[in-house]
Image (cartoon, rainbow, N blue to C red):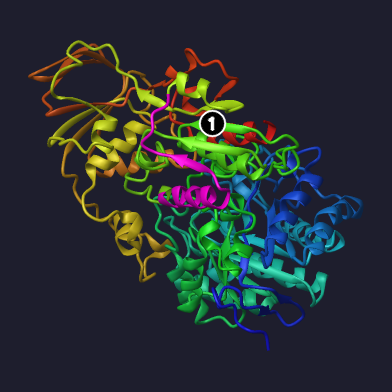
Amino acid sequence: MATANPHFPKLMEPLDLGFTTLRNRVLMGSMHTGLEEQDDGIERMAAFFSERARGGVGLIVTGGFGPNAEGATHPMTKLLKNDEDALKHKTITDAVHKEDGKICMQILHTGRYAFNPNSVAPSAVQAPINPYVPNELDEDGIEKQINDIVQMAAYAQVGGYDGVEIMGSEGYFINQFLARRTNHRDDRWGGEYENRMRLAVEVVRRTRERVGENFIIIYRLSMLDLVEGGSTYEEVLELGKAIEKAGATIINTGIGWHEARIPTIVTKVPRAAFTWVTAKFRDALNIPVITSNRINTPEVAEEVLGRGDADMVSMARPFLADAFFVEKAEQGRSDEINTCIGCNQACLDHVFVGKMTSCLVNPRACHETELIISSSEQHKKLAVIGAGPAGLAFAVTAAERGHKVTLFDSASEIGGQFNIAKLIPGKEEFYETIRYFNKQIELNNIEVLLNTRVTAEDLNQADFDEVIIATGIKPRTPEIAGIEHAKVLNYLDVLKHKKTVGKKVAVIGAGGIGFDVCEYLTHEGESKSQNIEAFMKSWGVDMTLKARGGIEGVEAQVSPSPREVYLLQRKEKKVGADLGKTSGWIHRMELKHKGVNMMPGCVYQKIDDEGLHVSVGGKDVILDVDNVIICAGQEPLRELEEGLDKPYHLIGGADIAAELDAKRAIDQGTRLAAEI
């Protein structure tokens, strides 16, 4: 009998599936990355997945592959049309198997979510997130969809996959048949729940019949729809038992439809926020059950398994952040893990606008074949000025390549703007990023000189070969009459220097920083991102699972704001329109819940003892506020350029300061270090 891992015994315990054994309890969950559509996508997916297999993942699930043109995510999706197409995937599966990993293909029929005028669904009910109305399927059409899904599983087998995951949750095609919200049929595929669940059961039964016994079938079960007209707990349990009987190997947890108005995976969501849902179903099912959503450290995963919430833990984005997550945990090096912060900025936000997925904290994710970090042939002495996101990313990567790096910062700690971000309720994960860089500095023997201001003359006299200027930004001061008034503060005064803020506040500038400041000012006490029960109450989620869909008839319980806040912007468009594609709506809803008055189209006239004078829609208004907080953009800090005789590079905010952008800063720093 194998000895239990001394660090994470539950997480590293093998899972016997009867015909095969998984080396641990870690599933790399499905993510659509954009690699699927690339001309060299097969080779790039092979590199991406094999690196994660080498890093120790027990079982990998690919991004979703559509079973046919009408069910794929969009018309450009590449399809598997024959065995020849399927055999090309051997490049991926062989690469994973070479690293002792196992991999399943996800079969994703998007139904009415397909960005496609030819999309199909149980009923012609348009999704609120899609401009197209789906075509209602007839009996023959339903049979075609089932057969195409089953055929896709057969192609996966030809391609060398160890199994498939059948996507039955998140509001996709199969889920659409299950819920009255989207299934208005009155034939044998609609009406009573026994009929509505027929398609899901038939898909699993026929797939098992086609692929045989020794092939993994994961069924992604929507355990909590989080939409009105969704399924009840009793219905989901009935389906889970039927899916088990139909031949599924494992049941994975799905939480929330894509159109649900409750956050499920962003950084505001507490860690492991929904494992209690899986736990309720695990007790009644006999096959292994996987839990998911916002599990991003091995400590959290071990705790989830230890209390019996699930048999496996699914983590998707954490493997964008760190391919060697499992290996580091297994070896007792969890403090070296580059933790996923749940920001969505380079993963989901990219996918939903048709860009290639990557990761804010790890720009190599999905770019393994082009962004190569190798030992440098010529080792240089490098000075990095500024220990913010750009400077840290450069320093660590350059040191890994063998360069001798000295990192300077005028502050008393590393992190730069991350030290501001971590103070915002719901953004506590930035503590993890700072912890990661501190550890990497230690491992790579980087000399760090804090509380140190350097001049061009200092650098000219030192023996550095090149200088990297990552000095960041300073807040921009807009030209408004009375901007020097005592009422006026900037965001650093509030967040960093903790200056007293009154009970009535106007925030000028509704970009990311303006929203962060409003979040900070409207909260008091413990952050909901640190308390699962408080989070669920604030969004109106029923933790007893008595409400249909988990939300019907449940009122959100929002704690009142300690301040009256106005959030103003010059632009006429909706306040917050430029925030992240998949997270912006959450920030807007949070502030709406707190009673923040969002005012677009403002012309700022003056600030005086009466308050802030603005014109909105041609009407003059005086906001009688105690403070006016300026969040009106940034300017680069570039003083070092003047008089510097050595070769130098500008990165991060020192290069471009249009808006605080850690994603660009870390990417730029990493790429420069890979080339220097």
User: Which residue: 54% across, 74% down?
Assistant: 7
Q: Which three-letter amino acid code belongs to the residue tagged 1?
A: Ala
User: Which residue: 49% across, 16% down?
Assistant: 641
Q: Is residue 490 visible?
A: yes
Q: State left or right for residue 297 relative to residue 634.
A: right
Disc 1 crowd, CA 10 A, few/some/many (<14, 14-19, 20+)? many
Q: State left or right for residue 312 relative to residue 267.
A: right
User: Which residue: 36% across, 24% down?
Assistant: 474
Residue 76 lies, in percent from the top left, at: 73, 37
Query: Where's the N terminus, which quadrant?
Result: bottom right
Q: State left or right for residue 351 relative to residue 481.
A: right
Q: What element carries label 1?
A: strand
Residue 573 lies, in percent from the top left, at: 39, 23
- Magenta stretch bounds: 431-454
> Above or below — where is 179 with respect to 674?
below
> Above or below — where is 590 with respect to 669?
below
Front-most of residues 633 and 260? 633
Front-most of residues 315 and 471? 471
Front-most of residues 573 and 93? 93
Of all residues shown, which one is farthest toward the bottom?
A: 1
Q: Name the residue under label 1.
A: 383
Q: Can residue 126 be seen in this view?
A: no
Query: Where's the C terminus, which quadrant?
Result: top right
